[in-house]
Amino acid sequence: MLLKAPAENIPIQEIPLQKNIKLFIKREDLIHPQISGNKYWKLFYNINTYLENNPENPYIITFGGAFSNHIAAVSAAGNLSGVQTLGIIRGEELQDKWRDNPTLLFAKRNGMNLKFVTREEYRYKEKLTEFLQNEFPHALIIPEGGTNEQAVAGIKMMLNNQTKDFDYLCTAVGTGGTVAGIAKFCEENQKVIGFKVVDDTSLENKIAELTSRQNFNLIDSCFGGYGKIKDENIRFINDFKEKYGIPLEPVYTGKMMQKVFELIDEDFFPENSRILCFHTGGLQGIEGANQLLEKQNRNLII
């Protein structure tokens, strides 16, 4: 069974501001209850193209960490498509603890097989990929985060007539595929801002390999590092949900929106700017984040 393209009318909600700037958020998180946001589009062509070629014994293999949105999405997509999946999980110590991890438990319930590898082994994913392709010659192997050329092509579907009238298009950046797709397919006059949630100096080069356009710039929104959650992040996310009724997760969209508000306060955007931020989903990660926060006796994400 192939993944279907959702309806084009994904809601765009305005975030009212006191300044003479218009801010909106496109709710890609509402695309699918289990494969949300940019993950749906990154997998769309990868999986459909693979299945359209009628592979013998179809099998999808990918990589991710303990709370990976990508692992969760691939497991759900495999379940939906009737294809067996394998997740290569960073951290051998999780071998006997996966039942306590909401993301990995979700993946297992979707039928995903999990193989836990050491962090050292995981670091050399090219070697791992080569080994896996030899062992499973008919398998589709999707890179960590899902970023490749087919993923970039899928991101094009986040853009439509609704998105053409904005001056700035904003997205969180992990592996670079989403910002590359937006930059590649947006209107000529639009400026694209990628909010880095990981301290990776190679991101610009990775994005340049996926699009020749130079209409984007990257802004640091790590707030201490990838996956690090500060009390200020929690306060922002909870206040945002209370004010606007929109849930945010603490790794990607939550940090992006916090940084966007900071930039607005600093007059980074010219007056009368129209800004569109993409909600890239990942809300499944809130449960795992709250597990860690509870152990640290800190406030939880609502």
Image (spheres, helix red, strand yellow):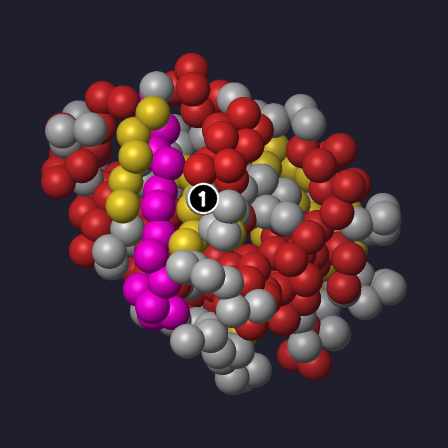
Q: Is residue 122 magenta?
A: no
The residues colored magenta run 78-91
Question: Which quadrant would residue 32 be assigned to in this image?
Answer: bottom left
Q: Give the crowd class for mark 1: few <14, some 14-19, many >=20 residues within 10 Å.
A: some
In this view, the residue in front, 232 or 286, is 286
In this view, the residue farthest toward the top is 120
Image position, residue 69 (x, y; %): 38, 48
In this view, the residue in front, 249 or 235, is 249
The quadrant of the rendering that contains the N terminus is: bottom left
Residue drawn at the location 39% of the way across and 19% of the way down: 119
Question: Which quadrant would residue 122 be assigned to in this image?
Answer: top left
According to the picture, the residue beneath numbered tag 1 turns out to be 136
Image position, residue 285 (x, y; %): 31, 47
Residue drawn at the location 28% of the way across and 40% of the way down: 114
Image position, residue 183 (x, y; %): 75, 55
Mark 1: secondary structure = loop
Residue drawn at the location 36% of the way across and 28% of the way down: 90
